[in-house]
Amino acid sequence: MSNYHQKTKNRILIFDSYIENIKKSVGTKMFQDLFMVVNGKKKNILGGGDLSCATYVSSVLLMYGLLKGRHATVNGTIKDMEKSGWRKIKKPKIGSVIVWEPYDRTKFGSHWHLGFYIGQEKAISNSSVKKVPIVHHFTFGIVNGKPARKISSIWWNDKLNS
C-alpha cells in the first residue's frame, strides 16, 4: 500500500463498486470470447457470446477478489465460489449470484445459467440471444403463475457486507 493510502486511510468500497460495475456491464461485448487450444486448434469456446454467463460472472467476481479464477462453465464457477467463501442463502439480496436450473435450448441442449441479482425482482445475466449481459426479471418472468425459469440456488459472500 502506498504512503498516501496509509496516511489518508482510503479504502475501496467493494460492495458499492461491485454493484455499479454489474449495472454498467449491461450491453458490453467484453465477455463474448474466450480462446483455447482444442485438439491442437484455436477455438472460441464461448461461441461469440452464446455461452458466456460463467465467464461474465466469474470475471466480475475475480475483479473484486471474490473468486480465485476465471471460468467458462457454471460448474467451475460454483466450485470456485464454494472455495472462495460463498454460501447459499434462501432469498436474493442485491449483489447475490443466482443459479438457474437447466433450460433446454435446441442449439446447445440443456444448460445451467447464472447471473447477478440487482434488486426489485431484477437480475443481470448474459443473454444467449443478444450475446451480452442484459437486465431481466429474476425468474425470466412469470408463466401461468409460476417462474419461467426456476432458481436452483442463490449465493452470497460476506465480504460484500463491508
Image: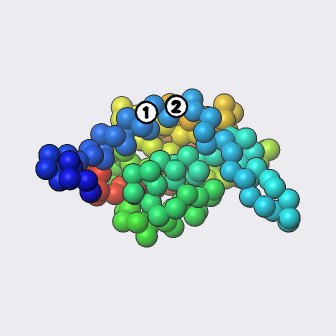
Q: Residue 44: image x %, image y %?
A: 76, 50
Can residue 122 be spotted in the picture?
Answer: no
- For the N terminus, the quadrant is bottom left
Tag 1: amino acid:
Lys
Residue 43, given in percent of the width and then of the height, sits at: 80, 53
Please identify the residue farthest to the right as the structure is shown: 40
Vertical order, 46 against 139 (above or below): below
Is 76 displayed left or right of 22 in the figure?
Answer: right
Up-down relation of residue 149 to residue 130 (above or below): below
Left-right relation of 26 to 11:
right
Residue sitting at x 47%, y 64%: 68
Task: Give the residue drawn at x 21%, y 49%.
Answer: 5
Mark 2: secondary structure: loop
76 lies above or below 98: below
Picture quadrant where residue 20 is located: top left
- Circle 2: residue type: Val
**For residue 143, side relative to residue 88 (left or right):** right
- Identify the residue position indicated by label 2 in the image: 26
Task: Please state the horizontal and vertical placement of residue 66, each as a whole percent of the image.
Answer: 40, 57
Marks 2 and 1: CB-CB under 8 Å?
Answer: yes
**Mark 2: few, some, or many residues within 10 Å (few <14, many ≥20)?**
some
Residue 40: percent from the left, percent from the top?
86, 64
Residue indicated by mark 1: 23
Observer-nearest of 138 and 71: 71
**Between marks 2 and 1, how big is the CA–CA gap?**
6 Å
Which class describes the residues within 10 Å of circle 1: few (<14), some (14-19), or many (20+)? some
Secondary structure, mark 1, is: helix
Q: Considering depth in this image, is 7 or 20 the residue closer to the camera?
A: 7
Q: Along the line of sight, which residue is nearer the eye, 15 or 37? A: 37
Point 36% across, 31% down: residue: 120
